[in-house]
Image: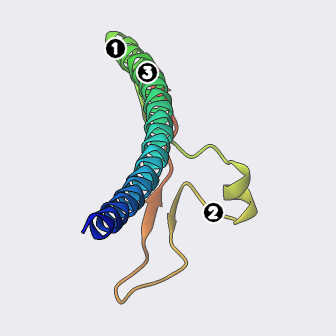
Amino acid sequence: MGRKMLLDLRKMLLDLRKMLLDLRKMLLDLRKMLLDLRKMLLDIRKMLLDLRKMLLDLRKMLLDLRKMLLDLRKNRNCRLRLKCDSTRAETGLHLSAKRTGPFKSAGGGISVDYWQPRCAHQR
């Protein structure tokens, strides 16, 4: 009986060793996954920092635009009004200031006005 018990004990120790090796392999796989996760989190952090920088730049641009609009609002004498100014496109296409479009519909053409910025005192 002693020999059979020793053989059973040896078998149990071999099974335990196999389980410990499997556990070690699982722990190594878990470590690799955690390292990959850490790398992904660092990449996400970098992307978020880049996004923050872009948002700060956008905020600065919006503040500059707001300032420009406020400056335009302060100078209420000047209004944006477009007028024909014989640009290259107009002369190259032989277009007039108020013109009929090249595509005629059933009743007539499409009339297009070209405008340019002018101040109120120049009207």
Q: Quadrant of residue 52?
A: top left
Between circles 1 and 3, the one closer to the viewer is: 3
At horizontal 49% and vertical 41% (from top left) the residue drawn is 35
For marks 2 and 1 on the same chain, the one whose residue lies earlier in the sequence:
1
Residue type at mark 3 is Leu
Checking the image for residue 56, the label placed there is 3
Q: Earlier in the sequence, mark 1 or mark 3?
A: 3
The answer to whether 57 is drawn above or below residue 116 in the figure is above
Nearer to us of marks 3 and 2 is: 3
| Disc 1 target residue | 70
Pick the front one: 54 or 33: 33
- Mark 3 / mark 2, whichever is N-terminal: 3
Callout 3 environment at 10 Å: few (<14), some (14 to 19), or many (20+)? few
Residue 32: x and y in percent read 49, 47
Q: Secondary structure at mark 2?
A: loop
In the image, residue 76 above or below residue 54: above
| Amino acid type, callout 1 | Leu
For the C terminus, give its image quadrant: top left
Q: As displayed, is residue 72 above or below residue 19?
A: above
Residue 62, horizontal then vertical, whole percent: 39, 24
Q: Residue at x 51, y 73 (%)?
A: 101
Instruction: Please state the horizontal and vertical placement of residue 12, each as a whole percent of the image.
Output: 31, 62
Which kind of residue does numbered mark 2 sit on? Leu
Query: Would you call the spot at circle 1 few (<14 residues within 10 Å), some (14-19), or many (20 or more)?
Result: few
Find residue 95 and name its label.
2
The secondary element bearing badge 1 is classed as: helix
